[in-house]
Amino acid sequence: MIDFKKEIANKIAKVVAIDEKMLKGYLEIPKDTKNGDYSFPCFRLAKELKKAPQLIAEDIKEKIEIDKNIINKVEIAGGYLNFYINTKFLTEEVLREISESENYGTSDIGKNKNIVIDYSAPNIAKPFHIGHLRSTVIGAALYNIYKYLGYNVTGVNHLGDYGTQFGKLIEGYKLWGNEYDIDNDPINELTKIYIRINEKCKEDENVLQACRDNFKKLEDGDETCVTLWKKFRELSLKEFQKVYDLLGSKFDSWNGEAFYSDKMPEIIEILKKSGKLVKSQGAKIIDLEDKGINTPCIIEKTNGSTTYATRDLAAILYRARNYDFDKAIYVTSYEQVLHFKQVFEVAKLLGLDEKYTKGLEHVAFGMVLLPTGKMSTREGNIVKLEELLNEAILRASKIIEEKNPKLEDKEEIAKKVGIGAVIFNDLANSRVKDEVFDWNQILNFQGETGPYIQYTYVRTQSVIEKSGIKQEELTNKMVNIEKLNDEYSQKIIKLIYEFTDILVEVTKKEEPSILSRYLIELAKAFSVFYNENRIMVEDEELKNSRIYLTYAVGKVLKNGAGLLGIEMPERM
């Protein structure tokens, strides 16, 4: 399908002799359609061309060569050039592409480019709580969208299966393991031990030291510590899988922190050779003050055990060698901003090609807070994700029972609606904002929500079913373009055209909410179209044209929601 921005930029470039890619980046989509479909701000060229924006606009308009079959007209508004696309051409292009492409909006923009996305990463032996939801669904959405755009993507679940907390858990298990039924209720029972041992550590410094020693023993391969660690890990993964099954989450790699335990000596050796690894108060650190980072990066603790940073550095080296990544994305809360600043800076000392160190990117998101404040496993105030998802399904089921008790497959539909509501709620707003967890808000089935998009999709399928036309018979050849000239149809056409650009914008900003907001806009546009334009009219050409446009809306809503991890029910 034609790239209108590229087409316009190309025509302007021939007049002003400036790089087409740069000009394309300057083009805007006006909020008011009276100002055209695309607008070029000439003030962006004023310094380079040493002219007033108005004069630049007049000069370009006079000299630009446009194809009237593609661009109807060009107008000047102050220092802006406004371009109006030929609606007939646009409509034909969009509906032809919808007809020919099963996965409308796909692209080869990512061809031969490798992306690694590190997301979810719950901690072994701790509850999979609502705080982990954000990393899981943001990471999954980015994974799906990058793949849709042709990138070779590797999704990594970098499990928190190593570290001092395991020293604590091992110590707690040694002290009180026989008091807890870990085999039948692993996460809850291990959590109780973890909370209890943390209290004990606060009271007794010797217990805390024993916990630290346990982790060092684990790193050194102590049989008892390793056996317990393996048990905690296997039981935890079994429990986590229940949540991943509900969310539809899949990963290409489950290599957690422990996977890098035998790869850290190489990291320490490389850093030693760099001359930057120094001793400080018994620990080994990299001083980063000259890089504007006041906190040093600790590579090895005083007792010789490694740190989260050491393991992340080993992971970077491993992923560069094995995945040859162009970009490595880390989806974690903004609490880890300092950590990743340190790690990405130290990674420059590993002797890697600059391509890899430039490709490291931390995609931070805001915290999920309870009305009472931050959640903490050690304090025991968390909302477990499996319970939340099951509650969402239950509430969706009750609404369906009230509104459509005779609906078939109610359980499956309630699952799609309930899970969809939770995922969309998380992806609807900018990822950097903190989110106060509120049952009423997260399961609000009114307004700009996941269920609203699902309901709009179901409505499109209902229209098609009532028309008597089978899905396989729907084709752009049934459309009379002249019948879709009204503003409501054209609003939908323009939104559908933007779909690929929206996905590209998501990857530029690592911001899935851009797609979420787009889907809401498309659903709203269809609702207005549906209310203003009767579809089942006597005029056969008009009816068929509107039915096909309805089909196009349903297709894009389903594809877009699927990229966010939301399944569409066919009925509600």
Image (cartoon, rainbow, N blue to C red):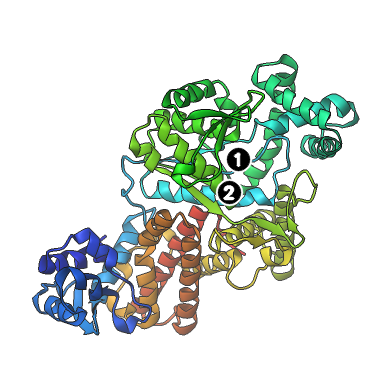
Look at mark 1 in the image and give the residue it sits on.
121
Give the residue type that dot 2 points to: Ser
Alpha carbon separation for disc pair 2 and 1: 8 Å
SS under mark 1: loop
Which residue is nearer to you in this view: 47 or 89?
Answer: 47
Q: Residue at x 72, y 14 (%)?
A: 223
For the residues bearing labels 2 and 1, Cβ distance under 8 angstroms: yes
Position of the C terminus, as image quadrant, is bottom right
Query: Furthest-left residue in view?
Result: 63
Q: Is residue 465 left or right of residue 25?
A: right
Q: Residues within 10 Å of mark 2 (few under 14, many from 20)?
A: many
Quarter-of-image position of residue 402: bottom right
- SS at circle 2: helix
Please provide percent x and percent y for residue 134: 60, 52
Query: Which residue has dot 2 on it?
Result: 135
Identity of the residue drawn at 38% across and 29% down: 351
Q: Looking at the image, can residue 231 be seen?
A: no
Residue 120: percent from left, percent from top: 59, 43
